[in-house]
């Protein structure tokens, strides 16, 4: 079954200009009945003055004067405006003017008491203004991702029934998925349906969301421990990596000293033998035998030198590899721990924003908004809950801890 989001996405695709690939702006209709932006008309020119429809490639045989006289498609413009209002804030940031500076800027906040939107610049000014000091708890941050499903309609829609403009929407039809209705609707299309008045339903929503927030707050207390554990584990990882680095350097130094000592001892022995031969202290050997012996000594010294070079090269290679591996292991754990902590901070921020929005709504005591707005806060709470559960079930922090414990045990 298609959802409202699917319908909005489908309409957004249909109402795109085939020239600029953006949503139609000041749309006009060509003789072939296809639409495009008025500003995109010059881009239709091909091969001199010939124009073709970008949809059906039909030639547009009209003069510039005739084209300039095209009237805007008012009906389509109204449909596009309604579509903009139905989109989430994050997809439709520039659809409202700021209540302070009147600039058509990014929607960053909404005050339930002022019933106004504020841009990023003016939102802090509104909250810090002495005149609006009592509005602080009634202002919500709309730039956060948790408000992605909340559309402008829910905050600005009049309580007037669209079918009976003389009536207010004072009740909720339980049978028809909590749709708001007026007294005439109740005894018309919704006759015999179970209903609740706005105040009762709004209070039920508040009580339910309060319970959900209390449960989430308890879960957040445990979640804080997870963030703290990640921070402490990062310190342990740094400490172990530092100890391992010192150990690698120590092993390299000891290995180098051993090779150098062996080479020194061998060299001293060879030099002593060479000195004896040179001084004639080995009379039992003939001249030719002495020359052979010297050659053997020189060859042995050369082999010893080559062997030492190879040993030192291997020691250096192992030293470099071990240092690189140690650093890579530390960075990999840092990256995974940073992801855990970042997720924790983002989750905490989302939780605080939801809590602030709930507090603002309760403080404003607007039952109409409690009926229309609170279900989205409930969805946001559920999303945070699910995200926490998913993260804990993934066992990523536990896996890092196990890996760390294994390294400690090996050490």
Image (cartoon, rainbow, N blue to C red):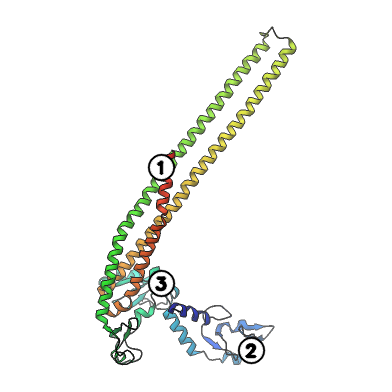
- Which residue is identified by label 2? 60
Which type of secondary structure does the marked residue at label 1 adopt?
helix
Distance CA(mark 1)–CA(mark 2): 74 Å
Residue 148 image label: 3
Q: Residue furthest top?
A: 283
Residue positioned 58% across, 35% down in the render: 314
Name the residue located 33 percent from the left edge and 74 percent from the top edge: 375
Against 408, residue 221 (above or below) is: below
Left or right: where 401 falls relative to 261: left
Q: Position of 389 compared to 136: left or right?
A: right
Dot 3 lies on which element?
loop
Q: Are marks 3 and 2 in contact (CB under 8 Å)?
A: no
In this rendering, position of residue 103 left or right of residue 289: left
Query: Which residue is label 1 attached to?
Result: 239
Q: Quadrant of the C terminus?
A: top left
Q: Quadrant of the N terminus?
A: bottom left
């Amino acid at each position: 079954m298609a959802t409202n989001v699917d319908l909005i996405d489908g309409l957004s695709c249909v109402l795109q200009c085939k020239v600029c690939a953006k949503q139609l702006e000041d749309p006009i209709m060509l003789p072939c009945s296809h639409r495009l932006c008025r500003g995109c008309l010059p881009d239709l020119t091909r091969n001199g003055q010939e124009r073709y429809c970008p949809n059906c490639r039909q030639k547009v045989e009209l003069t510039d004067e005739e084209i300039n006289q095209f009237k805007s498609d008012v009906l389509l413009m109204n449909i596009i405006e309604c579509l903009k209002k139905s989109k989430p804030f994050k997809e439709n940031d520039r659809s409202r003017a700021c209540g302070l500076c009147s600039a058509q800027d990014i929607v960053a906040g909404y005050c339930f008491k002022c019933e106004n939107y504020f841009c990023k610049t003016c939102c802090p000014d509104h909250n810090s203004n002495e005149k609006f000091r009592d509005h602080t708890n009634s202002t919500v941050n709309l730039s956060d991702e948790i408000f992605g499903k909340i559309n402008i309609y829910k905050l600005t829609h009049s309580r007037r029934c669209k079918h009976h403009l003389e009536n207010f929407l004072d009740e909720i039809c339980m049978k028809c998925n909590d749709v708001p209705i007026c007294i005439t609707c109740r005894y018309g299309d919704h006759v015999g349906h179970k209903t609740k008045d706005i105040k009762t339903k709004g209070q039920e929503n508040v009580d339910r969301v309060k319970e959900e927030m209390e449960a989430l707050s308890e879960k957040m207390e445990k979640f804080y421990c997870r963030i703290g554990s990640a921070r402490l584990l990062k310190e342990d990882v740094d400490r172990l990596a530092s100890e391992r680095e010192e150990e690698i350097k120590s092993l390299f130094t000891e290995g180098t000293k051993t090779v150098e000592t062996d080479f020194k001892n061998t060299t001293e022995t060879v030099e002593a033998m060479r000195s004896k031969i040179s001084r004639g202290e080995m009379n039992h050997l003939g001249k030719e035998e002495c020359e052979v012996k010297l050659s053997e000594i020189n060859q042995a010294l050369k082999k010893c030198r080559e062997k030492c070079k190879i040993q030192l090269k291997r020691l250096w290679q192992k030293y470099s590899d071990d240092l690189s591996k140690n650093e890579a292991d530390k960075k990999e754990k840092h990256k995974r721990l940073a992801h855990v902590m970042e997720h924790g901070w983002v989750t905490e921020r989302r939780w605080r924003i939801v809590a602030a929005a709930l507090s603002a709504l309760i403080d404003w005591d607007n039952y109409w908004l409690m009926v229309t707005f609170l279900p989205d806060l409930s969805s946001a709470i559920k999303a945070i809950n699910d995200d926490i559960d998913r993260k804990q079930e993934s066992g990523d922090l536990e896996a890092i801890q196990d890996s760390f414990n294994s390294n400690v045990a090996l050490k």
